[in-house]
Structure formats: structure tokens, C-alpha cells
Amino acid sequence: MQRIAQVLKSNGTDGELLISFFDIGPEDIDLQEPVFIYFDGLPVPFYFESFNRRGDTRALVRLTGVRSLKDADELAGQAVYADYFEEETEEDLTGWTVKTPAGETVGTVTDYEDIPGNTCLWVRRPDGTEVLLPFHEDLVKGIDEKSGTLVLSIPDGILDL
């Protein structure tokens, strides 16, 4: 799942929330798909009952099951996740060149492996061998869509195999 937004605060007394989006705009949200907020380490799905844009990066929303100021206040500060962005992004990376932050070419993305909680990319190295690399937002150091280049900080030892 990809973090797409943050609940900034409650709004009013009937459960509305003000949320702010990361790296996407409100127009990119699929209002028919659930979003998830983690409670006790587990993702809990919520659907949008209402969605009103507030500028380029925010929206005033009502989520299923959030009916009071108390409910809304419990969600304030929580991250909002969606699972429908991740697959699209990974499939779009097929054919991209992977480089290290030092500029060394690691290889070309050939596929991805959706391991729960640990998405990985299959990368064909220049010598023809393939390596499975972790693909996590903390490891992505740069993306150049124009050239199709992905810069990844690769954990020590993975490329030594």
C-alpha cells in the first residue's frame, strides 16, 4: 500500500475531515475504491461518502463510519493509504534503468514481485543475471520519468551475489 494523504484535522461536529495529499492530487483519487488507515497495526478500509476539493493538495471528506467529532478527532494525524496506485507505478517501471546514487548502472527493470509488505523489482543486470531488489519509498533517491531512470539506494550485500 502507498501512503497518499494525511488527516490534518476534524472539521465541524459531524465527522468531516480535512486531508492533505502527498505526491498526487485530489483528482487522482478513485472515489469508488477504499482508502486505509492503520489501527493496531492493521489496515482498516474506509470509503468516501463525500469528497470536496480544497485547493490543489487538500480535500474536505466524509468517510464511512466517521459520524462525530470524537470519531474524526481519533483520525487526526493519521496517514491514509491506498492500494490502487502501487501496481500502476510498478508496471510503469518495466524497462526503466536502475542506477545507484553514485551513478552506477545496476540494470533494467523486467518485472516486480508483490510480496506482502515488501514489494521488490526484478532487475536484469548488464551481465544477463537477474537480481531481486527491494522497492520501498525510503530507498528511492530519484526518479527521472523523461529518461526512464530510477535511482535506488541498494542495501549492502544484495548486488554481491
Image (tube, helix red, strand yellow):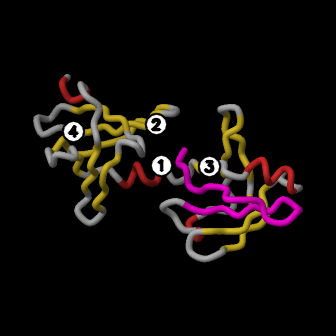
Residue 87's disc number: 1
Q: Mark 1 or mark 3, which has the lower sequence index?
A: 3
- What residue span does the magenta drawing correspond to? 1-21
Q: Could you tell me how far apart the alpha carbons at marks 2 and 1 are, in whole angstroms?
A: 9 Å
Mark sitting earlier along the chain (2/1): 1
Chain-order first, disc 3 or disc 2: 3
Which structural element holds mark 2? Answer: strand
Q: Nearer the viewer, residue 13 or 28?
A: 13
* Quadrant the N terminus occupies: top right
- Return the residue at label 3: 79
**Disc 4 element:** strand
From the image, state whether disc 3 or disc 2 is nearer to you.
3
Identify the residue under disc 2.
114
In this view, 70 is above or below 146: above
> Label 3 vs label 2: CA separation?
22 Å
Q: Which residue is mark 4?
A: 124
Q: Position of residue 42 (x, y in %)?
A: 67, 34
Is 16 within the magenta? yes
CA gap between label 1 and label 3 equals 20 Å
Q: Residue furthest left?
A: 127
